[in-house]
Image: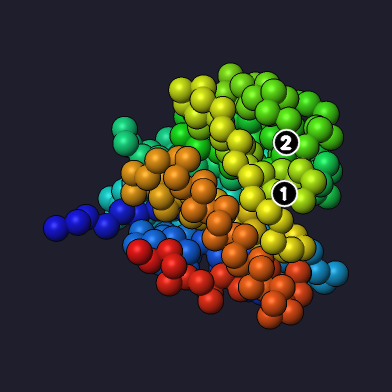
Amino acid sequence: MRVQKKIAMINDFSGFGRCSLMVSVPIISAMKVQCCALPTAILSNHTGYEDFFFDDYTDRMQEYYEKWERLGLSFDGIYTGFLGSEKQVGIVQDFIRHFAKENTVIIVDPVMGDNGSRYTTIDEGFCKEMRKLLPGADIITPNLTEACLLAGDSYLETGADKTELTRLADKLRKLGAKNIVITGIADGEDICDFIYTADKEAILLRQPCSGEAHAGTGDVFSSVIAADAVNGEDIVTSVKKAAAFVGKAIKLSHEMRIPTQEGVCFEELLCELAI
């Protein structure tokens, strides 16, 4: 009998806007993995909107997961997403120390910025703290902006230059990450993903751009990667699957005239992941 895997998902809960836990829970569940949520913050809707309710969960996180520890819970994967403060990085480090076993897969999605700029809540001190999650990370899924921030580099304006991407990924490898997936690299009419494996194999994947960028697509992408990782899927196969799924969801969202702020209508396609 197949044993169902479990992922501890550390991310914010945004009630509207298709991102974070509202994306990860259904996608990971559809891929036959139990998703166990540890919220970093509670939001009415994501911060791309002009107004939102925000409840910082920093002071509750440790008390929350201590109950899991007392219950003797264990996880096959630990997946970190949006962290709202430097203190939360330390809390995540503590969580990993308590719950990661020899075969636990650690997936880090370092949510810090996009399009060459840091998010308004992110400063250099936060970037420095985020680098502390790279040692021991089996997979990291930064976009190009986040990869540059982690490496301490200026933003790459060269598009999908494999030589430059390899140099950048090698710096992240030296910081401790095993497999690096740099996502959503715009290159002309294509969107590319760059994989730098634990064996230092550099692979550039590209597909035609499906439409305008939508909120939450990084969460969709990384959720597929995380579920595949604990199920033992090859990283290259997994990235191809995640990229194709995101591209199809963007295309369908455009056809259905869904505003970009509302994310992508992945719900319409979940059955394709449950194979």
Q: Residues within 10 Å of mark 2 (few under 14, many from 20)?
A: many
Q: Position of residue 113 (x, y in %)?
A: 76, 46
If the image is split into quadrants, where does the C terminus sit? bottom left
If the image is split into quadrants, where does the N terminus sit? bottom left
From what the image shows, is residue 8 above or below residue 170? below
Q: Pointer 1: what residue?
A: 190
Q: Earlier in the sequence, mark 2 or mark 1?
A: 2
Q: Which residue is found at the position 42% from the left and 35% from the top?
A: 97
In the image, 128: left or right of 236? right
Extreme residue in the left direction: 1
Q: Is residue 61 visible?
A: no
Q: Nearer the viewer, residue 83 or 154?
A: 154
Callout 2 secondary element: loop
Q: Nearer the viewer, residue 128 or 173?
A: 173
| Residues at discs 2 and 1 in contact (Cβ within 8 Å) | yes
In the image, 117: left or right of 131? right
